[in-house]
């Protein structure tokens, strides 16, 4: 799959992101020179973790026949030591209150095994930047 990011000249920093049939806007805050018309790249990175945890728990619950109502994942970022090599994310998960404690604990353990959590903590990512020519 290819993801395409294209500058939107209608705002100082805004870009559109095309992922398959889905389109969203990314931008920077006004303090950073943008118009704050969309999340910034750090927001998307952090959101990927929360979304993956939620979807993984739901997928597991559906496969195991667990009746799971509400799922909420609040992701909090501490980037105060990012320049020293530590980027902290805290995912606070709130589940349907009708679940028993054993099921809650199992779902929380499953959340820690979501693919994005593993990708962020256990995988070496290799990135290659290529010259695509002139537009």
Image: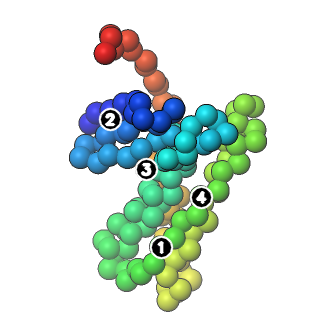
Q: Residue furthest bottom?
A: 98
Q: Residues within 10 Å of mark 2 (few under 14, many from 20)?
A: few
Percent coordinates x, y for residue 18 in the rendering? 31, 40
Residue topped by disc 2: 3
Q: Residue at point 51% right, 33% down?
A: 13
Local secondary structure at mark 1: strand
Q: Is residue 44 above or below residue 125?
A: below
- Sequence-earlier tag: 4 or 3: 4
Q: CA distance from mark 1 to mark 2?
A: 28 Å
Label 4: how many Cα within 10 Å (few below 14, some 14–19, many 20+) = some
Structural distance between the alpha carbons of marks 4 and 1: 13 Å
Q: Which mark is residue 75?
A: 4
Q: Which mark is residue 71?
A: 1
Circle nearer the viewer, 1 or 3: 1
Q: Which residue is mark 3?
A: 115
* Callout 2 secondary element: strand
Q: In the image, residue 105 lies at what x, y percent?
A: 55, 74
10 Å crowding of disc 3: few (<14), some (14-19), many (20+): some
Q: Is residue 113 visible?
A: no
Marks 2 and 3: which is nearer the front?
2
């Amino acid at each position: 799959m290819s993801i395409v990011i294209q500058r939107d000249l209608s705002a100082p920093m805004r870009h559109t992101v095309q992922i398959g049939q889905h389109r969203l806007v990314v931008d920077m805050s006004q303090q950073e020179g943008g118009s704050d018309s969309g999340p910034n790249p750090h927001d998307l990175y952090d959101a990927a973790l929360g979304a993956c945890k939620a979807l993984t728990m739901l997928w597991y619950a559906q496969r195991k026949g667990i009746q799971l109502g509400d799922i909420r994942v609040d992701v909090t970022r501490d980037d105060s030591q990012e320049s020293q090599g530590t980027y902290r994310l805290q995912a606070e998960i709130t589940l349907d209150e009708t679940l028993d404690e054993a099921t809650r604990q199992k779902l929380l353990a499953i959340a820690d095994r979501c693919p994005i959590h593993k990708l962020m903590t256990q995988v070496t990512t290799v990135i290659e930047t290529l010259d695509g020519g002139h537009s």
